Image (spheres, grey):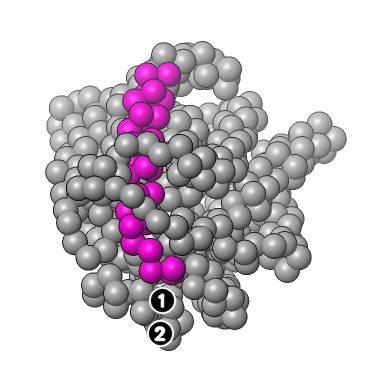
Amino acid sequence: MDYEKKRDMILHGDIKKALLKMAIPLLLSNLSQTLYNLTDTYWVGKIGSLEVAAASFVWPVLFFVITIGIGISSAGTSLMSQYNGLRDKDNARLIAGQIFSLTIVFSIVMTIIGIVVSPYVLRWMGATGELYDKSLTYLRIMFLSTPVSYTYMVFNSVKTSEGNTLTPMIISSLGVVLNMILDPLFIINFRMGIIGAAIASVISQGVFLILIYPLLFRKKDGIYIKKCNLKLRMDKVIKIFKIGLPSTIGTSMESLGFIILNSFIVTYGNTTLAAYSVANRINSMVFMPGMAIGGAIVSIIGQNIGADQIDRVKKAFKTAALYSFTISMTLGIILFIYAENALKIFLPLEQDLPTVLEGTEYMKLMALSLFLVGMNDLLNGTFQGSGHTLYSMMISMGRLWIFRIPMIIIFQNFTDLGSTGVWYAMVLSNFLTTIMGFLFFFFGKWERRVVEKSPVYDQD
């Protein structure tokens, strides 16, 4: 489907079909990324639960480093979507070039900073002994893939704004297939352990840049980047940061919140940390449909707001909410029933039984509240598409900083729940954040367009 047909589908076609055509590739892409993580978990789990815990322990740090890229690319998606709704491809292409230049600069800076400060961050998080050693080695190698992650986010932003979620899915899936081949080779055959997992990840992410660059810069009818678009324009940079900064703050504070959450969890011992780590990898599978619907709604919201079709925007949200709720409830029931069996796939050793039992308790609690995660993703996607990312920032920060972490502290100090208090806090924070998001939806001013059609003066 070409650019104009995608645009017509989003603005004038059947909303259910438009949502599904965009959400299904996103779902497959998200599933491929989850398989990517599960592949690492499966093969690293062959070595031991400590290695699994180390790989998961550093995840919030890696996420924190890419938050600037997330903010810039989410601003780009919002702006390009609304320009597409206005039939202003010149400004959409200019935004694409601006976010590409910005992410290249920031990715290099963040890679260097990440490698340098890793030891101090891990110590601050409470890592010691073998957990510290394994986490540090894994983290520093993984930082090398930061420029690749930033570039892929730009590519995904451009394609999503067009309504094209299929191409990013194909490239993402190719990376997963390569990682599934390299993981056992480096981890088991070459006996490199967790270091092998990191090397396999970096290689599998980097190889497919040779596909991304031609697709970003090749002239076509849709959104592509011209050389003149790469020169930073202060008015556009300000607009990008105005929209992207709340997303960056929200995701970075969310990431920092998860770092602190990990520091609480590690106080309960490596068994609890490993249970949380492996269960989250499995939970991420059932989170995928809600994330896909939340991702698909971004372009639909953005383009229709750009075209001043607010009634269609609200219809799209209601349709997406129905899909998300129905799918999440179904998957939640399945997860609740098969939680223990799923954990035993990744923790098959007899000595891992305590980890399995604790992980099962956590997974069953999350299964009962799965629909809340889907609603959060949908609300975030709506606010991202509208360009009013302040609401998204407040949801992201509120979930951990206003609700979850304070409740964990209360449960830890004033109850005898132990690690179960952490699981309760996670469920309750998801519930309260969903309420917050719907208050913003019904009473906020997110329907206003953030772009206007304007001339672009450039040359090839």
Left or right, residue 354 beside residue 165: right
Report, in whole angstroms, how far the alpha carbon at label 1 lies from the one at label 2.
6 Å
Asked if the stretch drawn in magenta spans residue 108, the answer is yes
> How would you rate the neighbour count of disc 1 (Cα within 10 Å): few for under 14, some for 14-19, many for 20 or more?
many
Q: Are marks 1 and 2 in contact (CB under 8 Å)?
A: yes
Q: Choose between 427 and 434: the one closer to the eye.
A: 434
- The residue that appears at 62% across and 66% down in the rendered structure is 447
Tally of numbered tags: 2
Q: Secondary structure at mark 2?
A: loop
Q: Is residue 329 visible?
A: yes
Q: Main secondary structure of the magenta part?
A: helix
Q: Secondary structure at mark 1?
A: helix
Where residue 211 appears, as percent x and y from the top left, is: 16, 49
Q: Is residue 344 visible?
A: no
- The residue that appears at 30% across and 44% down in the rendered structure is 229
Left or right, residue 37 beside residue 227: right
- The residue that appears at 64% across and 49% down in the rendered structure is 390
Amino acid at circle 1: Ile
Where residue 441 appears, as percent x and y from the top left, is: 69, 65
Extent of the magenta region:
85-113
User: Where 62 falls versus 459 (above or below)?
Assistant: above
Q: Choose between 284 and 347: the one closer to the eye.
A: 284
Q: Quadrant of residue 402?
A: top right
> How would you rate the neighbour count of disc 2 (Cα within 10 Å): few for under 14, some for 14-19, many for 20 or more?
few
Asked if the stretch drawn in magenta spans residue 306, the answer is no
- Residue designated by label 2: 13
Amino acid at circle 2: Gly
Where residue 120 appears, as percent x and y from the top left, is: 51, 13
User: Where 325 falls versus 344 (above or below)?
Assistant: below
| Residue 179: image tag | none
User: Where 243 falls versus 385 (above or below)?
Assistant: above
- Residue designated by label 1: 10
